[in-house]
Amino acid sequence: MKRLTALFAMFAAALTGFAEIKEPIELWPGGAPGALGTGTNDVPTVTPYLPDPAKATGAAIVVCPGGGYGGLASHEGNDYALFLSREGITCFVLKYRLGSHGYRHPVMLQDAARAVRWVRANVTAYNLDAKRVGIMGSSAGGHLTSTLMTHFDLGQAQAADPVDRQSSRPDLGILCYPVITMEAFGHAGSRRNLLGEFPTAEQVHLLSNEKQVSPGTPPAFIWHTYEDQAVPVRNALEFASALERHGVPFDLHIYRQGRHGIGLAARPPEFETPHPWARDLMFWLKAQGFVK
């Protein structure tokens, strides 16, 4: 498996010319808390995508692929990381544990929080700025992203593990056609995989992230399509409305056309015709100091 991963990394780097893909790194080398076993589905990891050093900006983004909390979509992980690394951002694609493998909340949140902490604990090794660590997710990965944006903590200063001393608050969040709520206008499959068949009213409220926004929630870039038949555009609108009420800066882009799961609407290596959201995102990231 490692040999195949290394071969893929070499192929991708040669093909794209803008990313060096490293081996996946276990977030908890001694075993993840709450793990149901020791197989690959029980081991959360991050895979680093390193930009050309001449273009590196010192900013990092943890990328959470979508997949309804039942799978992980490569085009919302690998492809995003390749695209962003071309712009000088160091990316870490998160493999988080899934409902389809028997996991439920708060395990997914633990994995995302650990990923952000881990990046901050390793900024020296990757020449990064600990104050420019963002998170990005699509669909259910967008729900996980918005969950960390609204359920973060500042770390445990006295923890024995240096990773646990770091804050899990992202400095910004990027939400791509996100699932936001666990209520009726959310996504039933994501809710089932995250909370089980019969979630309590308290669980539904807690994980309906439009209700969990606070003034401490980080700035957000949000995009969705009006035509999305799987995750209603109301998810994005409700989250943006909550951000506005709490004085949190955001960009909101609603495009009329586009199916759910569209991603970049382009593939590596060239990314010749990405969806307009990618251009709008670059404009926003420049304003945030994440790209030059």
Image (spheres, helix red, strand yellow):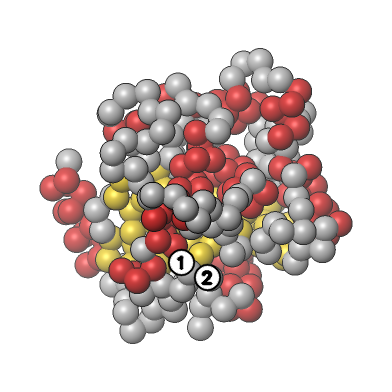
At a point 45% along the width and 21% down the height, the residue shown is 102
Specify whether residue 98 is in view: yes
SS label for mark 1: strand
Asked whether disc 2 touches disc 1, contact meaning CB atoms under 8 Å apart, the reply is yes
Q: Residue furthest front?
A: 158
User: On the image, which quarter does residue 41 sit in?
Assistant: top left
Where residue 185 appears, x then y in whole percent?
Answer: 76, 33
Given residues 44 and 84, the one toward you in this image is 44
Dot 2, crowdedness within 10 Å: few (<14), some or many (≥20)? Answer: some
Specify whether residue 274 is in view: no
Q: Tell me if 173 is positioned left or right of 241 in this view.
A: left
Q: Tell me if 287 is positioned left or right of 252 in this view.
A: left
Residue 60: numbered disc: 1
Where residue 190 appears, x then y in whole percent?
Answer: 59, 31
At a point 51% along the width and 83% down the height, the residue shown is 292
87 over 61 or under it: above or below = below
Tell me the amino acid under the disc marked 2: Arg
Dot 1, crowdedness within 10 Å: few (<14), some or many (≥20)? Answer: many
Circle 2 residue: 132
Where residue 186 appears, x then y in whole percent?
Answer: 71, 34
Q: CA distance from mark 2 to mark 1?
A: 6 Å
SS label for mark 2: loop
Position of the N terminus by quadrant: top left
At a point 82% along the width and 63% down the height, the residue shown is 247
**What is the tally of numbered marks visible in this picture?**
2
170 over 126 or under it: above or below = above
Q: Residue furthest right?
A: 245
At a point 74% along the width and 26% down the height, the residue shown is 202
Mark 2 or 1, nearer chain start: 1
